[in-house]
Amino acid sequence: MKLNFYATLRPIVGGKSVNMPEAIGMTVEQVLDELMRRFPALHKELYAPDGSLYPHIHIFINGRDAQFLEEGTNYIIQEVDTINIFPAVGGG
């Protein structure tokens, strides 16, 4: 399974996507924990000092923001799922 990253997150993980076959059967929260283990520098980009995800970080599962899924970050990843992780990007 590939996890897709966008904008400022790509340099941290080394490209557009990360192959993570073990994500199948994990919750979104467990996937995030594994990403923090693999890419410690990602932590400061995704998490606020209080340990919560920054509100400008969006984790989409099949095009739906995980925060709006019924299970939230307890959603269990399925083999057919697509995961995209976006920081909000602004410009002027």
Image (tube, grey):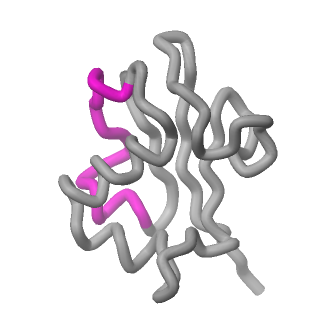
What number of labels is visible? 0
Instruction: Identify whether 60 is placed above or below 82.
Output: below
Of residues 20 and 87, the one drawn nearer to the viewer in this rendering? 20
- Where residue 6 appears, x then y in whole percent? 50, 54
On screen, residue 21 versus residue 70, left or right, reads left
Q: Is residue 18 on the magenta stretch?
A: yes
Tell me the magenta residue range: 9-23
Above or below residue 87? Residue 76 is above
The quarter of the displayed image where residue 44 is located: bottom left
Residue at 30% x, 63% y: name it: 11
Q: In the image, is 18 to the left or to the right of 69?
A: left
Q: Residue at x 19, y 53 (%)?
A: 38
Q: Residue at x 48, y 69 (%)?
A: 46
Above or below 27: residue 13: below
Query: Where in the figure is residue 78, as x and y percent of width and height?
Result: 51, 16
Q: Nearer the viewer, residue 46 or 74?
A: 74
